[in-house]
Amino acid sequence: MVQSACETAATLNLFFRKNSMKQTDTHALTIFLLVLMACLVAGCGSGGSGETADSQETTAIELISFADDWPEAGTTDGVCTVPEEAWPVDTSAADQVVGDGTPESCTSLALVEAVAAGGVITFDCGPDPVTITLTETATVFNDTGPEIVIDGGGLVTLSGGGLRRILYMNTCDPDLVWTTSHCQNQDHPRLTVQNLTFVNGYSVDDDPGGGGAIFVRGGRFKIVNCRFFNNRCDETGPDVGGAAVRVLSQYENLPVYVIGSTFGGRDDLCNVGSNGGALSSIGVSFSVINCVMSHNQAIGYGANPADAGTPGGGSGGAIYNDGNTFTLSVCGSTLTNNTANEGGGAIFFVSNDRSGDLFIDRCYLSDNPSLGFETDPGIFVLADEIDYSDSVIE
């Protein structure tokens, strides 16, 4: 049987875990390489044709290309009410339009320039789905906007080509213009991504780390009706994570809204990183509403703080939250078949001073193995208030 790339990664990581082997162990490494070689000969991967990058660089991951059968964004029933501030933004009066009506006009350069200019950004790439493979990361400048909205209209896929992060915003990066004296707590830029698909993002060894598809620090951020497939960040490290999305330092600890979106959704589309295959943060509140998170993986090992002789990581197969005072609210969402080498196959939530809160309402959590430790099935939580309402957690 041919395994997907995600299944292969899970099998190999489980092999090391079960045999209590470090990757520096010569015997274990030999076996690992033999298994990997056999897998490659057998044709491990998605079985489909991969995206072709626009450069001669060698990609570090197997790429995926657009397919009509990819999972839709979010749950089908939408059982939880979305607060008004988390609604999609009206983009009928765009400030920047990428493309002039043809797929060929929707280039990486056009997108990068539009994001740098800021404002409301839409696409005119023709009537059919289109993929834009980034040849450089699209970067938000802090003195634009302050509202920055990127709306793909349900037709646009943005790809990192297995070489780079797709989107970057950081209020504390001096190269992107400091606009206040308190970059870690400012109300702008306010970034929204909506009706987009993010694939093949890659941020291994980036500084700052994490966020294979999107990294955000500062301002405000929300995700509406988006999909995240086959994104990668660092494979090990006690706190690094967010194979799809990494968020830090949100204004006044207001929540990041993640609405009607899908992360993974199928075993060949998983997002994989040291911690938090879908979402990762330190001290940031999230409100996750009507979302699907499945088949994502936290593949680090050694937890946090890292066990002696290990690089650390491996917690929160889907969601990784760490810090002090913050809230994770998950409503009307499905989290299944996510895996963590250490704690929290679905959710890892640790409030160090026990001032943070975890709320799970009308959700379905099932088959989220925690290979190291958990407080509830698929969950590791240390918090002040913990409330599970009308949910299946098994």
Image (cartoon, rainbow, N blue to C red):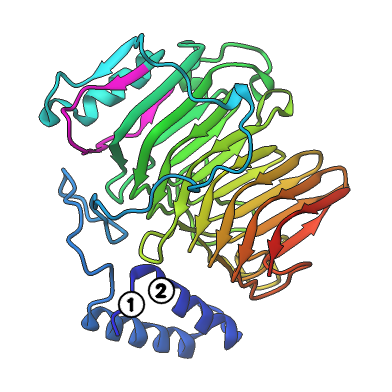
| Residue 380 visible to an observer of this rendering | yes
Which of the 4 quarters of the picture holds residue 2? bottom left
Q: Residue at x 60, y 33 (%)?
A: 257
Which of the 4 quarters of the picture holds residue 34? bottom left
In this rendering, would 130 be left or right of 169?
left
Q: How far across and how far down the image is residue 368, in percent?
A: 60, 68
In this rendering, would 44 be left or right of 290?
left
Marks 2 and 1 in Cβ contact (< 8 Å):
yes
Q: Residue at x 34, y 81 (%)?
A: 36
Q: How far across and how far down the image is residue 337, in percent?
A: 53, 67
Image quarter of the N terminus: bottom left
Q: Residue at x 68, y 74 (%)?
A: 372
Q: Residue at x 41, y 13 (%)?
A: 119
Q: Nearer the viewer, residue 106 or 186?
A: 106
Where does the magenta region start and end? Answer: 121-141
The kind of residue tagged 2 is: Glu
How would you rate the neighbour count of disc 1 (Cα within 10 Å): few for under 14, some for 14-19, many for 20 or more?
some
The kind of residue tagged 1 is: Gln
Query: Which residue is disc 1 drawn over?
Result: 3
How would you rate the neighbour count of disc 2 (Cα within 10 Å): few for under 14, some for 14-19, many for 20 or more?
some
Query: Which residue is disc 2 drawn over?
Result: 7
Q: How far across and how far down the image is residue 150, in percent?
A: 39, 25
In this rendering, would 87 be left or right of 248?
left
| Residue 141 visible to an observer of this rendering | no
What element does badge 2 sit on?
helix
In this rendering, would 394 be left or right of 292?
right
